[in-house]
């Protein structure tokens, strides 16, 4: 090790203290941690559209959205799907639409630049289905080019080959209300009324409002869509009234007391659009609650207004607890006790949508958000279990019972393939991603390596047990998912660095001696991916281009993930990649700011691979703190 490396690494305790103090300083008085969950501008643009349709825009500070959208426009004229992507067509069209709805004229210099960007990439006709659907609501696209969603889907029984519960939770909570919207096919007048004819590359007179043909067997879906559209025109849609009534009831039953639907903005927006189609009044309590829930996802500053796609207090709190415990805070520290009791209060003891396919499981899980009783998830629950297990609460008996209930629920959610998905059991009919409506390729929620790894890490580190046969099935699934290069795919974080870190953390505690080869292969891959600056990074483009696995500019969170994985592998095998770890630690030390924080522009969270990405604003804080703290724990003060 170089002398400079030794000198720099000696600053680890000081860096931990600064990071720890910062994290404690941003804890909410109620006990939780919660930071912004950033996405692209389409969420905010669609909120503008919603308020214009409901005519609820004048009671919100929407004029500040113009400032926000202008600030997010890049030099090339477009808006990004994720930081540094060069701009994305559908995102840019929706931003342009929102600016027009806010009264910005087409002759504005920003709009001229945006229009050029959009037209060079094919214009509106080349956008995704959901962008076209939003434009159809205000007459800027024809409903003829939107896939039909026959409402009778709502009435298909749970045991049928296909029903609404074969869709992922996020697709289901967004699609059920669209059954109503696509049946009614409304066109709303907005103030100001706008057109977007200038965004059709081929000219508005030449537009073909039709679903694109792929020239393969999936064109069968186009034939079915034509049949559905003909049935609509002839008023021959079976069970139409009953299906619309069932969809309406489903929506009303799943609204939280806080007004949320599904804990995500798309489900909330679509549910409110459905109620608008059903002629609900803007002053109806259900509508008022729904609009208020969207307001609660907004972030307003002196000059800007933007809307988050979701909020992450349970997730942020659990990880913050783990980071602070790792950093040396006493398990009974008042801040951790307050956080732990808050988490306990958020355990969901109701049956949700998961119970449709899981008839044996009993409730006891956690969701991502403040309130989302229908959609708890396995990943959050496993992290909460690890966080609570690590601290000491005044009522330990209650805590332990809560944790056992959570572990039992997780065990009941194991999929047939051996792994775990995020929200559902055996939600894996991949053909649904091939239908025209499913162009985001996010219609299902199959088991994944990263969620499975989290469960295995929980079981191994907290000394919980499940059936031995099921445990081995899970391990076998995780091993099977290892890529030839030694890495693992990351469904919920970008990407192979995230997946590999999780898998190594799991294998190192669940069966370290048995799977030495797999552990060493994973660690070797991480070492190979290290950047010259000592950090690690991976672009979101790695979801589309396998050649980009583990490649990208260094970031604090991804560097921390790699370090966590390498240290777990070293602890399991006794073979530490010491030089790579030291260089990574030095990267974190060199990039830490005076106040103990790190900054990163990159989006390292994943919503839908290839289509929707997230930036968790606390990822760059608690993951580096975990990495630094585990480094200090593994290597003595004398060594560092």
Image (tube, rainbow, N blue to C red):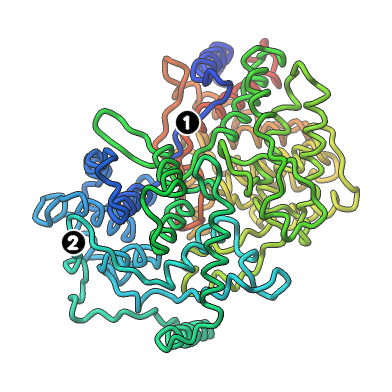
State the residue lying farthest toward the left: 107
Q: How many labels does the image show?
A: 2
Query: What residue sits 74% from the left and 43% below the top?
Result: 455
The answer to whether residue 507 is above or below residue 269 is above
State the residue lying farthest toward the right: 468
Residue 35: mark in rendering: 1
Residue that numbered label 2 is attached to: 194
Q: Is residue 31 left or right of residue 523?
A: left
Q: Which element type, helix, strand or loop, lies under badge 1? A: loop
The alpha-carbon separation of the residues under discs 2 and 1 comes to 36 Å
Label 1: how many residues lie within 10 Å, few (<14), some (14-19) or many (20+)? Answer: some
Q: Is residue 92 left or right of residue 177?
A: left
Q: Is residue 556 left or right of residue 627?
A: left
Label 2: how many residues lie within 10 Å, few (<14), some (14-19) or many (20+)? Answer: some
Q: Which element type, helix, strand or loop, lies under badge 2? A: loop
Query: What residue sits 62% from the left and 58% below the top?
Result: 445
Residue 475 visible? The answer is no
Looking at this view, is 387 or 626 the one in front? 387
Name the spot of residue 563 as percent of width and height, x first: 61, 32
Locate the C terminus and report the quarter of the image it occupies. top right
Q: Which callout, 2 or 1, points at the residue further toward the start of the chain?
A: 1
The answer to whether residue 293 is above or below residue 237 is above
Residue 443 visible? The answer is yes
Residue 4: mark in rendering: none
Label 2 vs label 1, nearer the camera: 2
Name the spot of residue 355 as percent of width and height, x first: 73, 55
The reply to whether dot 2 and dot 1 touch (C-beta < 8 Å) is: no
Name the spot of residue 293 as percent of width and height, x first: 45, 42
């Amino acid at each position: 090790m170089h002398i400079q490396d030794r000198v720099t690494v000696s600053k680890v305790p000081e860096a931990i203290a600064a990071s720890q103090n910062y994290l404690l300083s941003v804890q909410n008085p109620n006990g939780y941690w919660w930071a912004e969950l950033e996405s692209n501008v389409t969420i905010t643009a669609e909120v503008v559209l919603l308020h214009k349709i409901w005519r609820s825009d004048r009671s919100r500070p929407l004029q500040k959205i113009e400032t926000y959208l202008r600030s997010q426009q890049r030099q090339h004229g477009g808006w990004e799907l994720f930081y540094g992507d060069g701009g994305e067509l559908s995102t840019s069209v929706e931003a342009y639409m929102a600016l027009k709805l806010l009264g910005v004229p087409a002759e504005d210099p920003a709009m001229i630049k945006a229009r050029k960007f959009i037209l060079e990439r094919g214009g509106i006709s080349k956008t995704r289905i959901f962008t076209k659907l939003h434009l159809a609501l205000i007459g800027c696209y024809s409903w003829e080019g939107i896939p039909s969603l026959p409402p009778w889907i709502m009435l298909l029984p749970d045991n049928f080959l296909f029903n609404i519960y074969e869709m992922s939770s996020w697709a289901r909570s967004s699609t059920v209300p669209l059954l109503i919207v696509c049946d009614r096919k409304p066109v709303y007048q907005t103030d100001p009324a706008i057109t977007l004819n200038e965004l059709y590359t081929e000219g508005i007179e030449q537009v073909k409002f039709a679903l694109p043909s792929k020239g393969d067997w999936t064109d069968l879906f186009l034939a079915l869509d034509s049949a559905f559209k003909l049935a609509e025109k002839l008023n021959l849609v079976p069970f139409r009234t009953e299906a619309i009534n069932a969809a309406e009831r489903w929506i009303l039953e799943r609204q939280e007391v806080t007004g949320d639907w599904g804990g995500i903005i798309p489900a909330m927006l679509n549910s409110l659009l459905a109620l608008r189609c059903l002629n609900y009044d803007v002053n109806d309590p259900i509508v008022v609650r729904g609009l208020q829930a969207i307001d609660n996802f907004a972030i307003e500053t002196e000059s800007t207004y933007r809307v988050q796609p979701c909020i992450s207090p349970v997730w942020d709190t659990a990880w913050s607890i783990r980071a602070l415990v790792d950093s040396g805070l006493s398990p009974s520290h008042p801040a951790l006790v307050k956080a732990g009791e808050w988490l306990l209060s958020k355990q969901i003891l109701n049956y949700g949508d998961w119970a449709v396919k899981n008839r044996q499981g009993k409730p006891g899980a956690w969701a991502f958000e403040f309130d989302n009783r229908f959609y708890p998830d396995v990943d959050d629950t496993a992290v909460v279990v690890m966080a609570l297990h690590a601290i000491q609460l005044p009522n330990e008996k209650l805590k332990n019972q809560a944790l056992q209930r959570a572990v039992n629920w997780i065990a009941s959610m194991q999929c047939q393939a051996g792994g775990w998905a995020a929200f559902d059991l055996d939600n894996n009919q991949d053909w649904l991603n091939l239908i025209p409506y499913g162009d985001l390729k996010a219609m299902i929620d199959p088991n994944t390596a990263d969620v499975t790894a989290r469960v295995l890490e929980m079981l191994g580190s907290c000394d919980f047990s499940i059936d031995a046969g099921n445990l081995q099935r899970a391990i076998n699934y995780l091993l099977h998912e290892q890529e030839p290069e030694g890495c693992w795919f990351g469904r919920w974080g970008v990407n192979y660095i995230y997946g590999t870190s999780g898998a190594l953390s799991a294998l190192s505690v669940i069966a370290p001696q048995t799977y030495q080869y797999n552990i060493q292969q994973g660690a070797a891959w991480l070492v190979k991916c290290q950047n010259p600056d000592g950090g690690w990074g991976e672009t979101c483009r790695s979801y589309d281009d396998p050649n980009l696995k583990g490649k990208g500019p260094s970031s604090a969170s991804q560097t921390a993930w790699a370090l966590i994985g390498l240290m777990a592998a070293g602890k399991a095998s006794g073979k530490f990649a010491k030089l790579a770890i030291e260089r990574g630690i030095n990267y974190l030390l060199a990039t830490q700011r005076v106040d103990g924080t790190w900054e990163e522009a990159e989006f390292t969270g994943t919503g839908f691979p290839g289509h929707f990405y997230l930036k968790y604003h606390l990822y760059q804080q608690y993951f580096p703190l975990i990495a630094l703290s585990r480094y200090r724990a593994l290597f003595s003060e004398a060594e560092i």
